[in-house]
Image (cartoon, rainbow, N blue to C red):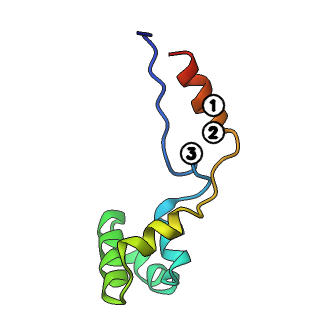
Amino acid sequence: MANTIVVFDFDKTIVECDSDNWVVDELGFNGLFNELFPTMPWNNLMDRMMMELHSHGKTIEDIVQVLKRIPINPRIIPSIKAAYALG
């Protein structure tokens, strides 16, 4: 086993944007998000946004479908494969 560990962040590394914002924007809730953003800490804001999405009938499957469309950095898949190949 190799003694090297490769660590990736997700947002703005593996995917080219912030995944929280992507979901909110793609599901059409950016107006409320922008209104609440200056008034709440991030985790509380995202908890609130998930509650709002749910209260408007959005499901986990809706979020999954939105995340399937998130832009992936074109260099990340070859990078992960190269790291994997090195053990």
Residue visible at 45% across and 79% down in the picture? 33
Instruction: Assign the N terminus to one quadrant of the image.
Output: top left
Could you tell me the amino acid type at mark 2?
A: Ile
Quick check: 32 above or below 61?
A: below
Could you tell me the amino acid type at mark 1?
A: Ser
Residue 13, horizontal then vertical, whole percent? 57, 44
Quarter holding residue 49: bottom left
- Graded by Cα atoms within 10 Å as few (under 14), some (14 to 19) or many (20 or more), the crowding at tag 2 reads some
Quick check: 14 above or below 20?
A: above
Does dot 2 land on a helix, a strand or a loop?
A: helix
Q: How many marks?
A: 3
Residue 5, horizontal then vertical, whole percent? 44, 21
Q: Which mark is residue 76?
A: 2
Report the residue that reaches farthest toward the right.
74
The residues bearing labels 2 and 3 have C-alpha atoms spaced at a distance of 6 Å
Query: Which residue in the structure is indicated by mark 1?
Result: 79
